[in-house]
Image (tube, coloured by chain):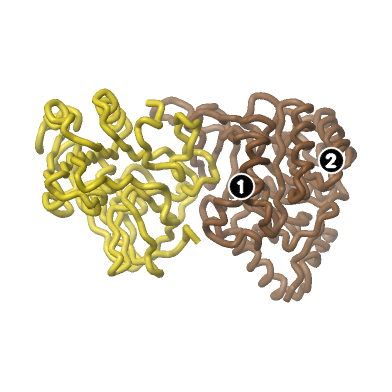
Chain colours: A yellow, B brown
Amino acid sequence: MKKAVNDFLVIENRALNATNYLIRLLSPEPLPAIYPGQFVNVGINDSSEVFLRRPFSIFEVDYENNTLGLVVKILGKGSKKLSEAATGSSISLIYPLGKGFSQPARADKILLIGGGSGVAPILFLAKTANTPAENVNILIGAKSAGDHIGIEDYRQYGATHFTTEDGSLGVKGFVTQHPLFAEEITGFDKIYACGPDPMMRAVAKMAQEKGIFCEVSLENLMACGFGVCLCCIEPTVKGNLCVCTDGPVFNINSLKW
Amino acid sequence: MVDLKVKIGNLEFKNPVMAASGTCGFAEELADFYDVSELGAIFLKGTTLRNRAGNDYPRMAETPSGMLNAVGLQNKGADYFIETIYPRIKDIDTHLIVNVNGSTIDEYIELTEKINELGKIPAIELNISCPNVKEGGMAFGISCPSAEAVVREVRKVYDKTLIVKLSPNVTDIAEIARAVEGQGADSVSLVNTFLGMAIDSEKRTPLLSTITGGLSGPAIKPIALRMVWQVARAVKIPVIGIGGIMNTQDAIEFMLAGATAIQVGTAIFKDPFTPLKIIQGIQEYLNRHGFDSVSGIIINKLQM
């Protein structure tokens, strides 16, 4: 079977900053191959107000220890409850879901852009792309320095740049105001982005203008996560497609942005 | 080994646990998880004569113990189903049932005639209860004369098992059930979703693009159960119970209220294995209560 539902054991839950948590989960079975951009749908038990599962991008996969890592940003009641998961408790996951980012070629010069909770799949891609570090630039945007997720040093995977809206870390402003965009954007072969909708639209617009290959990872509201409810649709050149099964990663040329 | 077989119309089902239309795609999505031939039947995603894009995003809102949807029958139309999907799924070894929709009686008839040609589709579920389309859908299911008219005309062109899916958005659902039984329906399935609404008080906007949508999940179960009980007493044809069934206990309650079979819907979104767990659970229940067949509990309805 291609997909599974299993109870995972919480082996670590640690606050990364005021609103983000890193949760590491032990799989009861050997993990299947999982790619950056894919996600899991997490069961959150169980108040009457959190009825549906919550989708989370996968941040890391450790096949040796059979664990998955998720970055959980508190956005509402479901993510709040999940952020309180105790070590030793179990959490139901439906996995692996969706289609991830395309794999860049070794010679490609790539720009990886993450904003807010969108940094999780972007950093997973940075870590696993077979592109050598000298061809990789990572651009991370946040509201302020305190919102950045300082999990580990990503400089080993590529040149790392920051923007913050208040200027407390890196360049002041949005990711698209970073000099990488203003001055060097045409030097990239491929751009990969995940973050708030306005950020991805701004990135997509600039990529489109310059004719640069660009993939974005969407996070439309979904009920099931595996293509049966038809709630998370995105209008595309091929009609309404499910973000959960046809995405969440889309080439910007297929979107009606 | 207890006997789980049930009969609806001329059709025998291997067990009474079925996947509800709109919650199991075209069976292939569930087949990513397990062998779907174990299910009693699979009610395929609502199909219309022609391609429908469905409603705009957002189409879903979570509500206490349930959810609203406003999908609006997104599907690629009858010809796409017949040419592309049907050949891929036709050999699944359980009953595949097409959920038939139309905005006019002629559309219902034309679609039914096309589906009638498919050898491996032994039944249709006539959907006169979709709350999320502007024309047709629920409009047919909320008055006796219009429900009678569509069932009468479809019955004329369809000899296989005809199941009619009823809307709960009516004053007296038993009256509608009797009306469609009178026109030759082999079974009624109920309930479709309840018309509902949700508003974001901070943004001061509706949560659905269509403003209203269909409510499903455990929030509706007690009302659905009451309606199944009322209908089961009012008609002689078998009733398929639907509405917030999340586990074995819920399924048994519907059967005690008079349902011959049940459909699992929204619960599949939370756990696609729910129908299989319920099949297992019903077997255990029958053993524990000393029934040797599932018809044993259904007969119990006479005492209520």
Image height check: is B18 above or below A204? below
Q: Earlier in the sequence, mark 1 or mark 2?
A: 1
Task: From the image, tell me which residue sits under label 1.
Answer: B26
Work out which quarter of the rendered image holds the C terminus of chain B and state it.
bottom right
Work out which quarter of the rendered image holds the N terminus of chain B and state it.
bottom right
Q: Residues within 10 Å of mark 2 (few under 14, many from 20)?
A: some
Q: Amino acid at mark 1?
A: Phe
Question: Residue B213 appears at what percent x and percent y?
Answer: 58, 33
Residue B215 in sight from this viewpoint: yes
Task: From the image, tell me which residue sits under label 2.
Answer: B158
Horizontal placement of A172 versus A247: left or right?
left
Which residue shows up at 68% across the image and 41% down it?
B82
Which residue shows up at 29% across the image and 35% down it?
A214
Image height check: is A102 above or below B255? above
Image height check: is A171 above or below A81? above
Helix, strand or loop at label 2? It is loop
Image height check: is B252 above or below A50? below
Which residue shows up at 62% across the image and 45% down it?
B85
- Residue A76: give its label: none
